[in-house]
Image: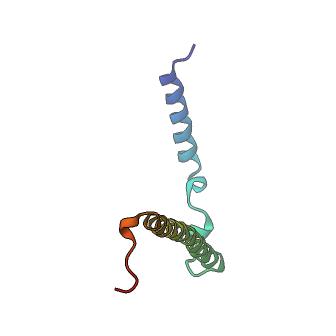
Amino acid sequence: MISILTKHRRLLALVLLVSACGPRAVLACSTCFGDPSSEMVEGAKAGVIVLAVVVYGVVFSMVGVVGVWTFRARKLANAHDPAAVRDPSL
């Protein structure tokens, strides 16, 4: 039975061997490593911006819902509290 440490050493040796023998395989893709003004890089940047807008839109919508619920809860609590009822003539 092979110990876990021996398995990890073999895996590490394999990873190092693959990295040393084929350095082109571990480089970044042509989009990240290539021309920063290419159409593919511009498209990736636009995709990141769109995803950020969607994520922040959802987060701010959830914050808005919590704010509306808090406002309604306070309004409802004040409606049932006789001490909170004010004289409208004041």
Q: Residue at x 57, y 82 (%)?
A: 37
**From the viewer's perspective, is 90 left or right of 44?**
left
In-image side of 43 versus 87 (left or right): right
Asked whether 54 or 62 is in front, the reply is 62
Residue 30: which quarter of the image? bottom right
Give x and y (percent) for residue 76: 49, 66
Image quadrant occupied by the C terminus: bottom left
What residue appears at the point 40 percent right and 65 percent down from the top-left corner? Answer: 82
Residue drawn 60% across the image and 77% down it: 46
Residue lying farthest to the bottom in this orientation: 89
Where residue 56 appears, as percent x and y from the top left, is 53, 70
Most distant residue in the top direction: 1
Residue 78 sits above or below residue 90 on the image: above
Q: In x, y percent, where is residue 53?
A: 56, 74
Q: Nearer the viewer, residue 67 or 8?
A: 67
24 with respect to 88 (left or right): right
Q: Residue at x 40, y 83 (%)?
A: 88
